[in-house]
Image (cartoon, grey):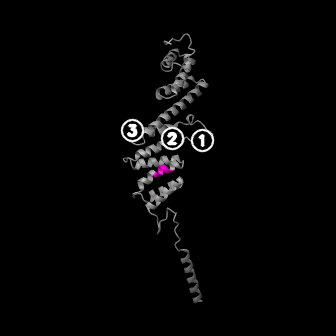
Amino acid sequence: MRILILAMLALTLAACSGNSREQPLDPMDPLATTRGERTAEELYAEAQRLLARGDHRTAANRLQDLQARYPFGGYFKQAQLDTIYAYYRAQEMESAIRAADRFIRLNPQEPEVAYALYMRGRANLERGNDFLTRTFDIDRRIRDPGPMLEAVNDFRDLLERYPDSRFVDDAEQRIRQLRNSLAHNELHVARFYMKRQAYVAAANRAMGIVENYQGTTSVEDALGILEQAYAAMDLTDLRQDVLRVIQENFPDHPSLRERPAFLPDFGA
């Protein structure tokens, strides 16, 4: 009996030893922590290969792993920048913005902040370009202007802080385009109020375009709405002022074609 018990114990210990044997490492597992762990250089090289293949989401994961495992290594800062780009290319704009914010917070004095600001603006610019907008060809200019306003702020921050950056020319061009889009958005709202005979609200929106979006293509139409709103509210003096501005700046404006007889000639 004693011999039988010893034999059973030996078999049990052998089984336990077999179950606890170290499992082989997965060479693609970035979180491996035992013998065979990949270096920062290897993780970064893999992320670059994934980016080149167009697998941007997985590349972002690898870059995040690199930052978590090697926060003081030589690849850390570049991995942060590449993470912004990887999320942007993966169409994950909120993640790209968070990655840009993190880089700016951790590296406030680094010249690469210019890139982070630029990419943050690009991500905000794309934030409103969602699946429904693309699928149904919706005019993005008449949707929520919040992302466009954020993008303008990002690009202006870039111009103010890094006027010699290589991103300046592109940022200036995008600001011009965004101002036109934002003015168009305000014009859309002003027309909405005019159709519902909310003349005070329509006039306020139109005046906002004239004051805040000089040089955009919407100013001419905004003056027309302003003139119509003042006419509807019998505000003759204000209407005359608007017609005078229209005469000086847009002499072919439709508001001047059928000017009522009681209004001054303005030299026309």
How far apart, in angstroms, are the residues tagged by discs 1 and 2?
14 Å
Q: Nearer the viewer, residue 43 or 15?
A: 43
The reply, left or right, for residue 231 in relation to residue 83 is right
Looking at the image, is 195 positioned above or below residue 2?
A: above
Asked if the residue under mark 2 is in contact with the one under mark 1, i.e. CB atoms within 8 Å, the reply is no
Task: Locate residue 102, reporting x and y percent.
Answer: 44, 49
Task: Locate residue 41, reporting x and y percent.
Answer: 43, 60
Magenta portion: prevailing SS class: helix
Q: Residue furthest front?
A: 52
Task: Locate residue 173, reporting x and y percent.
Answer: 46, 36
Identify the residue at horizontal 46%, vertical 61% (top origin): 42
Sequence-first tag of 1 and 2 = 2
Sequence-first tag of 3 and 2 = 2
Q: Could you tell me the amino acid type at mark 3?
A: Glu
Neighbor class of circle 1 (other Cα within 10 Å; few <14, some 14-19, many 20+) is: few
Q: Could you tell me the amino acid type at mark 1?
A: Arg
Q: Which residues fall within the magenta stretch?
A: 82-86
Q: Could you tell me the amino acid type at mark 2?
A: Leu
Q: Residue furthest right?
A: 136
Identify the residue at horizontal 56%, vertical 19% (top origin): 254
Q: Which residue is mark 1?
A: 134
Q: Residue furthest left?
A: 109
Q: Which residue is mark 2?
A: 125
Residue 68 colored in magenta in the image = no
Q: Which residue is mark 3?
A: 160
Task: Locate residue 139, reporting x and y percent.
Answer: 58, 35
Sequence-first tag of 1 and 3 = 1
Identify the residue at horizontal 53%, vertical 42% (top origin): 126
Label 1 SS: helix
How far apart, in angstroms, are the residues tagged by discs 3 and 2?
19 Å
